Image: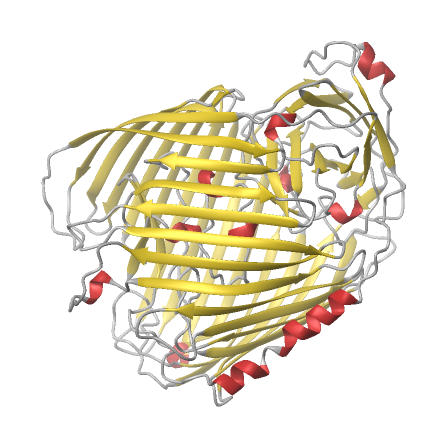
Amino acid sequence: MVLKILHFNKLKTLNLAFNNKANPYNIYTINQNTLKLFRFPFLLLFMLGFQTTQAQKKNAHIKYYIHKATDVIKLDGLMNEQSWLKAQAVNKFPMVLPMDTSVSKVPTEVRMTYDENNLYIIAICTKVGDGVDMVESLKRDWNFGKNDNFILFLDTYGDQTNGFAFGASAVGAQWDGTMFDGGSVDLNWDNKWTSAIYNDAEKYVWEAAIPFKSIRYKTGVQEWGVNFSRNDLKTTEKSSWAPMPRQFPTASLAYTGSLVWDAPLPAHQNNFSLIPYFKSSVSKEFATSDGTKINQASINKNAYGLDAKISLSSSLNLDLTVNPDFSQVEVDRQVSNLSRFELFFPEKRQFFLENADLFSNLGFENVRPFFSRRIGLNTNIDFGARMSGRLDKNWRIGIMDMKTSDDKTTGLLAQNFSVLALQRKLFKKSSIELFYIDKTAFDYPSSTINTSVGNAYNRNFGFEYNLAPKNNPWTGKTIFIKSFTPNKSGNDYLNAGNLQYSSRKWIISWQHEIVGNNYNAEVGYVPRNNYIKFMPSITRLYFPKSGNILSYGPQVTTTYYYNSNFNLTDNTKLFNYLITFRDKSTFATVIQNDYVELLSPFDPTRIGKQPLAAHTKHQWTTMGFDWISAPQHKLTYYLTVRKGGYYADGKLLSITGDIGYRIQPYVNFDMAATYNHIELPQPWGKNNFFLIGPKMDITMTDKLFFTAFYQYNEQTKNINFNTRFQWRYKPVSDLFIVYTDNYYIGPVFVKNRAVVLKFTYWWNK
């Protein structure tokens, strides 16, 4: 079945594919002794953290001395102001890729200055070799690996964990995001800043002004962490000002140099922004959820709402929202799901993004106690508030409270969602975080027979310890959670942890998860309950001194799932041999063996046919390859092929591919497709599932964008057509026109249709 996980005012639906409603993992009970057994990884990681030294930052001796501007900086991509001529110039960047043992052959020069309101940067990126610049489009937040680009990374807190990133492609398309976990960038964050690009046959020059009020920093500090990154696809070189090992991204804040100010930073002025919106929509339903044709009259709606961003201090922010609307958010790319569990789709809504790592980064890929897309499930958000940021150099806080509407037609009650997270820095980069997550229903009946009403409340309380030693190849974290749900007590714990060693040649990791039978995370993402999981992995890389191959080597990963009696229920053995070429293309061969004991009935086609019986055991082997083209061409592609066994001694052929072509920088065309051919005994027989999704992005200017996205999904019997026009008439202020169609397959007829006009305006004080 398909569960509608988030409904954006009936304009579009984001889907998660679920197995049947019965929990397939409630047969066994994980006892308290088993839980205690797996608490030791927390103690291990904690002791390892105490062994971390207080050594100086790796590149602390690399310094950029910034001085205040003496004249007005005009953003035009030309270095003709006196302030630029007087500013310190840095160049001769060390190469990071393909090898980190020499100076980059692609010259880059950077200068910085500032005034009372803005931080300024200019980067002169000299071109080497023949050919045009490689870019996708003029659209914001492009793919790093598919564009010639320059990026600035700022560690404004000096904690080597959180910060901000700003950059541009060779044609001036902006790129910005918040940084978390010491080297990850969330590109869904947008804020006000301006830039200009100058591009000729010899170089491109990026000049930017970043308002101090658009970022967070500690007042009075005279030193930040900073690094500059250059990616040049023609030469396949990536370089950075502060050197770093090739196995780390240039975004790694542990390897930043120092930005030294000539005076204390300008005092942060408390400011606030108001972001009102107006929306007008027309929608019509042509069929019910079971496919019955109807002829519902068109529904016209107007809506208003408001977001506010209030700066409480230089590093603490308050976000407020009233009647928010997310109809302009890009539609999710659909995925064919042949697994027994729901799929994960990332959060894209702006309100939830700043300092999102405090909430959404808790846990691991399949054990997340908080998943913000649960908020507003098939209903509207009435209002909400979120305070997040730093209390001082060691403490961060995140508080969120959201109220959703009831739905009389489905019996859904109004609900309140609350989250509290308090993070304490340990040593240089490690941290411990306490968190509390609460979902409570309003006007819950004192006695009810209707199970669709759900639980009166669900609460999760726990802590997470992140191990990030200073300049150490060891990293890891562990999390422990207890849930509270009416009529469910005992075996309601979750513990998970991982530990990884990374060097130039070796990557060795361990991960475990243990989830109790009664553990419940209604505001999280935990696809299954009542299991114990171990996942060790080892990778070895070799680096030839010459030739077309940059690196090659094997990877072995094994995954084990047990019940509480330590009887094996699932096992996957994966062998992968990866070859990376100097032009950045890759080729990998894969051999995988799967063993599954079904703990509940399961339809291997996931289209409503007869299920396989519970407790049946299945084992098969799959072989295949992954081929990804070099990114520095106008035509790019990838191909993934898997062929082998399947459930019930069946066979499965799965082919996934993507072809992209760009007419630089105005048109970017992408065709993604998946084909699954399943051969099973009767009553399932042979099944073919196509998923085709062509997408076209047209960027007429850096302020006018048009996207058309078509998706044909045979497994869910749905055709979706979505177009979106965006005019960014002022920084972070937009006009959207969105058109959406959904159709049934065989026979083809329309399900529903909607047109939305939305206007937003960002007002600052």
Return the residue nearer the eye: 352 or 331.
352
52 shown above or below 752: below
Give the image location of residue 237, x and y in percent. 77, 40
- Relative side of 10 to 570, left or right: left
513 shown above or below 270: below
- Relative side of 487 to 175, left or right: left
Give the image location of residue 726, x and y in percent. 42, 25
Return the residue nearer the eye: 103 or 565.
565
Give the image location of residue 483, x and y in percent. 43, 69
708 shown above or below 390: above
Rendering colour mode: secondary structure
Give the image location of residue 573, x and y in percent. 58, 76
- Relative side of 11 to 291, left or right: right
> Is residue 97 visible in the rendered structure shown here?
no
Identify which residue is drawn at 35% across, 60% down.
17
The quadrant holding residue 754 is top left
Return the residue nearer the eye: 656 or 532.
532
Identify which residue is drawn at 88% across, 33% down.
92
Specify the quadrant that holds the N terminus.
Answer: bottom left
709 shown above or below 192: below
> Is residue 762 visible in the rendered structure shown here?
yes
Return the residue nearer the eye: 224 or 301.
224
